Image: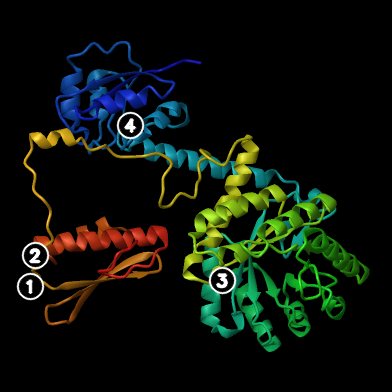
Amino acid sequence: MITLKVLLVTGQLAKDRVKNLSKLSKAETTVVDLSVPIAAFLSPTIIKNFLMRLDLKEFDLILVPGLVHADVSEVEKSIGIPTFKGPRDVADLPFVLDNLADVQLSAAIPADKLLSSKLKERALKQLKEFEQKLDIQNLLKKPGNFLIGELPIGKDFPARILAEIVNAPALTTFQLIERAKYYVASGAHMIDLGMIANQPRPEKIEEMIGKIKTELKVSVSIDTADPDEIKAGVKAGADLVLSINRSNVEQVAEAVKNIPVVILPGNGEIPKKPYERVQSLESNIKLAHQLGISKIIADPVLDPINFGLVESIVAYYEFAQRNPTVPLFFGAGNVVELIDADSIGVNALLAGIAFELGVSIIFTPEASSKTKGSVEELLTASKMMMLARQRGSHPKDIGIDLLAVKEKIGRGEEYDPTIEKDVEMINSQESEVFVGDPKGIFKILIDKDKIVVIQYSPQGKQNLIIKGKSAKAICDTIISHNLISRFDHAAYLGRELEKAETSLKTGKSYVQDMELF
């Protein structure tokens, strides 16, 4: 294996940090600092003029700071050594250096940006190739594998995400379709119609299933214990029925003989002890088989924290060991909805548990603001688990992740308080004075995946609307159209737009003039 000799160009202030971090990589590096204090202030001309004075014959590659604004290809033309942009943050330097073979570097695009895109692209390609290599027709002949609509499920296939539309009959047709579209766009493999307990509406089912299938061409399940609603769902073309137990199995057996069903333990009440739960579930499955139901998915039922979570996971494990070919149903929403914690980490952990258990269907609603994004989170987490297994690794450093607020590595330069003895200090102080901008004011809102800014005249008249996905794009538009005239107003608008963009990325609600966190 050939080791590249890399010259790392930086500014004076970052030199020591670059040296220390470069030692963490396997690459052979030399660090040179130019006469500019901050690396971002470097230009191709400054870099070129400085390097032309040095003997650089031993180097195979030159990396300049990723924050250099211009294209640095002119450096290579003058020096004769391949020159590319390194990472924007020094903290990413070891990662970039250790993965030089995995990416074609650029003179215009920072290396960390290229590398993260490349690793993600590679990860998604591996997942796609895995699915493409599956011999679906032969695998479907194995016990426990079958189709839900056109979607193959079972132990030999990846876990599928089933997204529930809660209280579906209470929604208008427009609301129902919009919700289903959102779930499919988030990555859901199937849509579940959650009926309203003790308020049977079988007459609504045919219309709901028909509308969703016409609009989206996706498998649809019906979630109810009511026999009339189950029969109506089957008649309307439901691809999956949940949930069936001893209390209703005999009433619906004839109707569900030819479609997949989810079987629960108990007779309406779920046994608490793991062994009793497994025995009850096996007993209900046996009865379902005797009644002619053949496509069965087992749901040992995942209980929320403080109400038997660990015992229910034990029941899953015990059932899976005793019934290795029966597909498992895993209701992640039972846990996520009933804990006041960010859903991303909880869903990631639950997806890992589901993967180890060999679960075939992961079920979730997004019934509250705190669980918004759960479908996409569970899908991404499931992909992470599958990639990790294929590579024989932990679900980290695989190209995709679920880090939204926290980060893998610390970034940014540490503040050196010793400079305070030589530099004047001014304590910050908020101004209590408000002066209106004669060009008007702005109302900032969020519309799905966009930031919306409405400009009002000083008299309160709506002048125009600007939409965009980034704070910078909207700021640039406001400036280019000369819509703002005061520095304090511009600073305020920048702060608020950055908050709005952060809310889009995190799913946190945005309210103008209120703290985001």
Residue under label 2, please give it: 485
Label 2 SS: loop
> Position of 449 compared to 184: left or right?
left
Residue 512 on image: x %, y %: 27, 70
Label 3 SS: helix
Q: Of the residues shown, which amino acid type is indicated by label 4?
A: Gly
Residue under label 1, please give it: 438
Nearest to N terminus: mark 3 or mark 2: 3
* Of 208 and 294, the residue lying toward us: 294
Q: Of the residues shown, which amino acid type is indicated by label 1?
A: Pro
Residue 158, placed above or below residue 369? above
C-beta proximity under 8 Å, tags 3 and 4: no
Label 4 SS: loop
Residue 293 on image: x %, y %: 87, 69
Residue under label 3, please give it: 180
Question: Looking at the image, which residue is at 84% across and 74% down?
Answer: 246
Residue 2, placed above or below residue 311? above
Q: How many marks?
A: 4
Q: Is residue 349 visible?
A: yes
Question: Looking at the image, which residue is at 51% across and 68% down?
Answer: 182
| Distance between the alpha carbons at the discs numbered 3 and 2 | 44 Å
Nearest to N terminus: mark 4 or mark 2: 4
C-beta proximity under 8 Å, tags 1 and 2: yes
C-beta proximity under 8 Å, tags 4 and 2: no
Question: Looking at the image, which residue is at 42% across and 31% down?
Answer: 95
Quarter residue 510 falls in: bottom left
Residue 364 on image: x %, y %: 60, 65
Residue under label 4, please give it: 86
Other residues around mark 3 within 10 Å, as few (<14) / some (14–19) / many (≥20): many
